[in-house]
Image (cartoon, grey):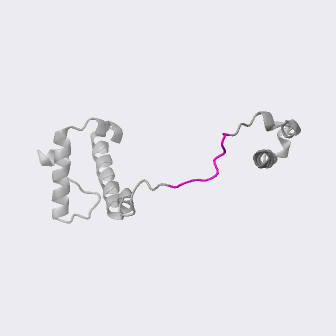
Amino acid sequence: NSKKLYQDNVINSLQEDLHDYLDDFDADDNVNHDDVHSVDNTNNIKFADPLITSVIAIDKCSKDEIPTLFYTHDETVKFENDYSREAQKAELLGISWSDWIAKRTDEDVAKDELEDEYNNDFNNDDEDSFIGFEDLE
């Protein structure tokens, strides 16, 4: 009987939630919600047998791994700066960033890495300047 009581409580709770949800709609929507509340939903809801009564949480990673799951502030800033430079290069070529990135070759990636090293060596903080393709050839 406790199983039946539990099922009845769940059904009543769902019906109350549905009623509250429908009441949130504008009163001028001219929809009759009374029909929804009068439906006997007991035949439409099925419960697993046996009912799940406990939940066991299993860590998917160790506590030591958690910090590596997220980008650091420096990594986020580097990503934003790289994207900005790439978008500027694409704009100079008159194409979209997605077209520019799709056309990149291994040689272009190597040039970008050289550019990053050059900029890091000289601590170039000017976001508007970068080495273009023609400067590396």
Considering only vertical position in the picture, is 79 above or below 103? Answer: below
Residues shaded magenta: 48-57
In the rendered image, residue 87, in percent from the top left (x then y), is placed at: 32, 47
Magenta region's main secondary structure?
loop
Q: Is residue 2 visible?
A: yes
Judge by depth and name the residue closer to the eye, 124 or 113: 113
Assign the C terminus to one quadrant of the image.
top left
- Residue farthest toward the front in the current orientation of the protein: 1
Judge by depth and name the residue closer to the eye, 83 or 95: 83
Quarter of the view holding residue 122: bottom left
Considering only vertical position in the picture, is 117 above or below 98? Answer: below
Judge by depth and name the residue closer to the eye, 112 or 133: 112
In the rendered image, residue 25, in percent from the top left (x then y), is placed at: 79, 45
In the rendered image, residue 50, in percent from the top left (x then y), is placed at: 66, 42
Asked if the magenta segment contains residue 5, the reply would be no
Determine the residue positioned at 85% across, 40% down: 37
In the rendered image, residue 60, in percent from the top left (x then y), is placed at: 43, 53
Quarter of the view holding residue 124: bottom left
